Image (cartoon, rainbow, N blue to C red):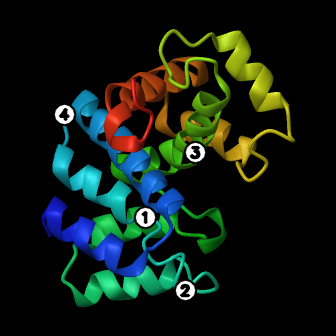
Amino acid sequence: MTYDEAMELLKEYTQSESLIRHALCVSEAMRCYAKKFGEDEERWAIAGLLHDFDYEKYPDQHPYKGAEILREKGVDEEMIEAILGHASYTGVERKTLMAKALFAVDELSGFLYAYALVRPTKNLKDIKMKSVKKKLKDKAFARGVNRDEIEQGAKELGVDLSEHILFVADCLQKQAKLIGLEE
């Protein structure tokens, strides 16, 4: 599956602008980690793009229904397992680097997007770790974001949490126009 085909699939199943934006954020974070680790950037970006594509139409069957659809389309099992593993409740073990990265960037991408929106500059340039960590402790801020999974994701990926946050923030800032954080 190409990136363009994945985008078509995402838009076929997802109408919500915020879910599409989240998919783009996760996709770009995955692309950055793939580059860092010397992996296939497009393949990792596709995994990020499709990790929640079934959520809007099949919220009670997510991500199982998505995995079924992707298998029918001939998507490789490693990518499908990564997508299944991004949701802790599936019990699918995150064995591959792709799976660990997808889990690590999913919740963090959503958090950082929300964080950017409340900044005076509405972007992620020159963020202060102290400020980010303060927002992470504020359970009322971006309440849908699972803070434990952000920490667990960094740990599973084998990266320092602060470095992980800054890496993903920098990656998202570089794609500000694409993800709706105009510079």
Q: Is residue 103 above or below residue 150?
A: below
Label 2 secondary element: loop
Label 4 secondary element: loop
Give the foreground label among 4 and 3.
3
Give me the disc on residue 9.
none
Dot 4 or dot 1, earlier in sequence: 4
Dot 2 or dot 1, earlier in sequence: 1
- Write the residue at 39% across / 42% down: 179
Give the foreground label among 1 and 3.
3
Callout 1–callout 3 Cβ contact below 8 Å: no
Q: Nearer the viewer, residue 132 or 162?
A: 132
Residue assigned mark 3: 110
- Write the residue at 38% across / 32% down: 176
Give the foreground label among 4 and 1.
1
Residue 21, position as x, y percentages in the image:
44, 53
* Alpha carbon separation for disc pair 4 and 1: 21 Å
Callout 2–callout 1 Cβ contact below 8 Å: no
Residue assigned mark 1: 51
* Alpha carbon separation for disc pair 2 and 3: 20 Å
Q: Residues within 10 Å of mark 3 (few under 14, many from 20)?
A: many
At label 2, which amino acid type do we have?
Tyr
Residue 24, position as x, y percentages in the image:
37, 51
Residue assigned mark 2: 58
Dot 2 or dot 3, earlier in sequence: 2
* Alpha carbon separation for disc pair 4 and 3: 25 Å
Residue 60, position as x, y percentages in the image:
64, 85
Label 3 secondary element: helix
Give me the disc on residue 38.
4
Dot 4 or dot 2, earlier in sequence: 4
